[in-house]
Amino acid sequence: MVSSPVDLLREHLPVEQESVVLSGDVKTGLVLVDVVNGFCTVGAGNLAPRQPDKQIQEMVDESERVARVFCEKNWPVFAFLDSHHPDVPEHPYPPHCIIGTDEAKLVPALEWLENDPNATLRPKDCIDGFLGSMEKDGSNVFVDWVKSNQIQVILVVGICTDICILDFVCSTMSARNRGLLAPLEGVIVYSRACATFDIPVDVAKEDKDLTAHPQDLMHHVGLYIAKGRGAKVASEVSFGA
């Protein structure tokens, strides 16, 4: 039997994942990356799925589950919302998540976060949320959130595994290594609560404007690189007493 590209990738570039139990013994914060309509809700925009997508739906469901537990426990939550000015393009992507539109809003399953006192919402106009948290005075909203809440570990969920999540994780790990994020020690990427988009190779071949982006393969690549940068990858997340 001929192995699929994804199976070959998993064989030669394995990603060790583990079950993680979160408890109040370690101050943990949840970071949601771009769980907005423009990336997750069918037909919502240029970068939204064209049809129901199993991986994206599982990401939304798991993101909602862990977010509700965090807020029930009064643990801090930080949500990035991709938001762009209509006159400032983000190459190489088409216009998406324009400020003031439904595309730039949290998906319906997470709209309640807008009024939850445990949640900090941060619109961002670039791929990397760490950079998107920079203010004109040089401060950083995400860094301030970590410090003010004395967060030791962050759990990262959202979309896209290999783009916005990966860029954020890499920047966060570098900032932590430089001593800019004390007391942050660990970054956990929850694989089941992460997703990316799907452009199959055969579809890309039919359209010169498209670049192939097979979903399962690129999701794995994102997790593999994140782990290589020092993040922990979790296959399951549960909560202790």
Image: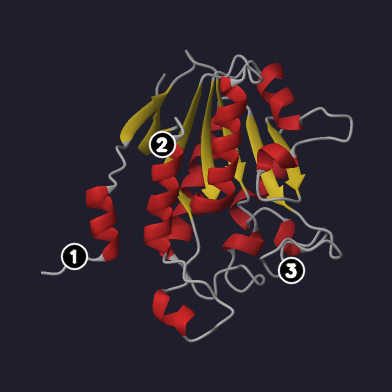
> Disc 3 and disc 2: Cα gap in Å?
31 Å
Q: Which mark is residue 37?
A: none
Q: Image quadrant of residue 175?
A: top right
Whether residue 9 is visible to the viewer of this picture, yes or no, is yes
Mark 2 or mark 1: whose residue is earlier in sequence: 1
Q: Image quadrant of residue 135?
A: top right
- The relative height of residue 136 versus residue 147 in the rendered view (above or below) is below
Residue at the farthest bottom position: 206
Q: Which residue is drawn at 46% across and 39% down?
A: 226
Whether residue 191 is visible to the viewer of this picture, yes or no, is no
Q: Is label 2 in a helix, a strand or a loop?
A: helix
Image position of 81 (left or right of 241): right
Which residue is denoted by mark 1 in the rendering?
3
Amino acid beneath label 3: Pro
For the C terminus, which image quadrant? top left
Amino acid beneath label 2: Lys
Contact (Cβ within 8 Å) of mark 1 with mark 3:
no
> Disc 1 and disc 3: Cα gap in Å?
37 Å
Camera-side residue of 155 and 108: 155
- The relative height of residue 134 versus residue 202 in the rendered view (above or below) is above
Q: How crowded is mark 1: few (under 14 residues within 10 Å), some or many (20 or more)?
A: few
- The relative height of residue 81 versus residue 190 in the rendered view (above or below) is below
Q: Position of residue 43 (x, y in %)?
A: 61, 74
Q: Is label 1 in a helix, a strand or a loop?
A: loop
Which residue is denoted by mark 2 in the rendering?
227
> Disc 2 and disc 1: Cα gap in Å?
24 Å
Q: Where is residue 166 in the image (x, y as percent from the top left)?
A: 53, 44
Q: Residue at x 88, y 35 (%)?
A: 136
